[in-house]
Image (tube, helix red, strand yellow):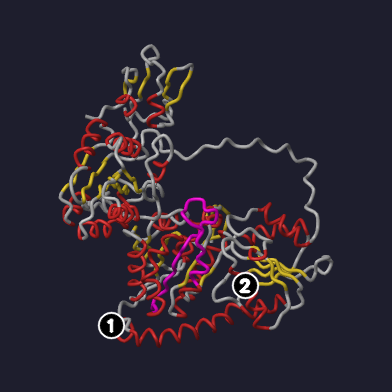
Amino acid sequence: MHDEFLMGNEAIALGALAAGVNVVCGYPGTPSTEVLETVARRRGDRVYVEWSVNEKTAMEIAGGAAYAGARALVTMKQMGLNVASDPLMCLEYIGVKGGLVVLVADDPGPISSQTEQDTRFFAAFSKVPVLDPSSAEEAYRMVQEAFDLSEEYVTPVFLRPTTRVSHGYASLQVKDPGEYTVHEPEGFVKDSARWVIFPRLSFANHRKIEERNVRLQDVFSASPLNRIEPEDDACPCARKGIATGGFSYTYVMEAREQLGRLRTLKVSTPFPFPEKRAVEFLSGLDEVLCVEELDPVIERQLIYVCGKYGLTTRILGKMTGHMPLSGENSRDSVLSAIASFMNVPLPAASEEASDPPPALPVRPPVLCAGCPHRASFYAVKQAMKGRKTIFCGDIGCYTLGNAMPLDMVDTCLCMGAGLGIAQGINHLEKDRSCFAFVGDSTFFASALPGVVNAVYNQAEFTLIVLDNSTTAMTGHQPHPGTGRTMMGDVVEKVSIANVLRGIGVTAVETVDPLNYQAAVEVVRRTADLPGVKAIIFRSPCVALFRSASRVTIDPARCVGCKKCIREIGCPALSIRDGKAVADPAQCNGCTLCAQLCPTGAITGGEPHA
């Protein structure tokens, strides 16, 4: 054993390696991404790792590995679980042989997601056990326990860290590589009565799943994962208690130190819920405050337990207005809620406390200086000026195309949805030019069915593929179009243009968006063609390629028209003394501003022919 200072996701990865994981796959999504990346960086020769094209495929690969007796880990964020839900629901019914851990990182806030979806409810819906860590240290232990649990009960098991667990840091003891479990998969054994999911088998296994989960309620009730922390007899609120879980537990512990000790139930297995432990906790209590993030999962379970066992304890929380219904908890919000629950004043601020710091300036999210997506959006905007249009966006850096002055994202729902939305609107409004924007990674992950559907059903819209040669928003992971894998192999790139032509899109154009006039001409020429047409704007992400040349602005020639700022909104440009200036620390020399300048005041950079 040795000590390491680790991010929570790194701790989970090392815990999986210590448990002898054989296969790790997933799709990048904040806040889960670093788990797979850490496995790839720290793995030995016995571990296979990949970024799959999407979460559904990753779940199926992990399931196949578990069929063969391997220990498999599949990683995603809460939105990705929706994509993976089809194989997951069936895997629960069919069962596994090796351990299968499904890491789903939830995002209260939400900080970097479309929704605040709660995987604890999905666990109950899918009947899959879920472990809910409260810290990096606990996540490191829990992922190892999850593999054992999965193999013992032949079921997938969720591990559900939230953002603060995934991205928080802690110093913890981890095993040395020589202490890792060595797991030798038996291999796949043919048995169609077990592995082929027919209705009769599903019916029989459904009954077994329900019986198993009842047993797990008792197992979890006796487990130290779910524990009652003793009340303090000196506390004036001895007949009150707190029920909590996940990262909120750490806030509760801090509040107890300041307000006094209350009987506390820590729930680490929200499903199956530890009923007997809960009954023990509730006995003798008049009121319980449930402190949790996202949905009232613990709160609902305790209300159910009270009804089932005839207990009169009053359960308070989100549904009673004692805790917020949405968003993240914080140390201060939990402290305030518990103080109100205990009917005690908030502790006075320390006399030695310094003055509060000034409020941070609000900086709206913006595309990076020199980002090729800015040029792509601007070219389409100018080419379609004066036309009745709709611009359907997608999930990625390019969602920021909605910001002024570009204002080029009219809709954004979920990955790949822009293609379907554009088709739906086109079927109703034939006079509107419909565009769907999608990134190169998202193209492979979720856009292909939309393209097939459009060709088959004779839709009419323009697909814009923003190809910057990476999965930029989540940290520059490879994808099928990059020509490299997470195992470090160099492979043949999958051509987006060839894929589109293979599907049946006959009009496919590729252009560098930083060549402004050429990009505008391609859009004008292509948009009026009948049927489904595609434009691939290809230019590398500025984080992968940084020009050594910067633009300069001649103040003598600058007339202060502000077109370079008003039109494209590049953060490297500003106005000083009535003249445009370029910040050399931010400028990437893309020359888009120079191509737009009406007086030729902007020069330098690397021109795009």
| Horizontal and vertical percent position of residue 460 | 23, 51
Relative to 392, residue 297 above or below: below
The residue positioned 34% from the left and 76% from the top of the image is 67
Q: From where the camera sits, is residue 13 visible? A: yes
Residue 110: within the magenta? yes
Relative to 579, residue 408 above or below: below
| Magenta-highlighted residues | 95-123
Specify the amino acid type for callout 2: Asn
Nearer-the-camera pick, 371 or 520: 520
Q: Earlier in the sequence, mark 1 or mark 2?
A: 1
Quadrant (top left/top right/bottom left/bottom right) for the C terminus: top left
| Horizontal and vertical percent position of residue 369 | 40, 33
Q: Is residue 294 left or right of residue 48?
A: right
Q: From where the camera sits, is residue 46 visible? A: no
SS for dot 2: loop
Residue 156 falls in image quadrant:
bottom left
**Residue marked by disc 1:** 190
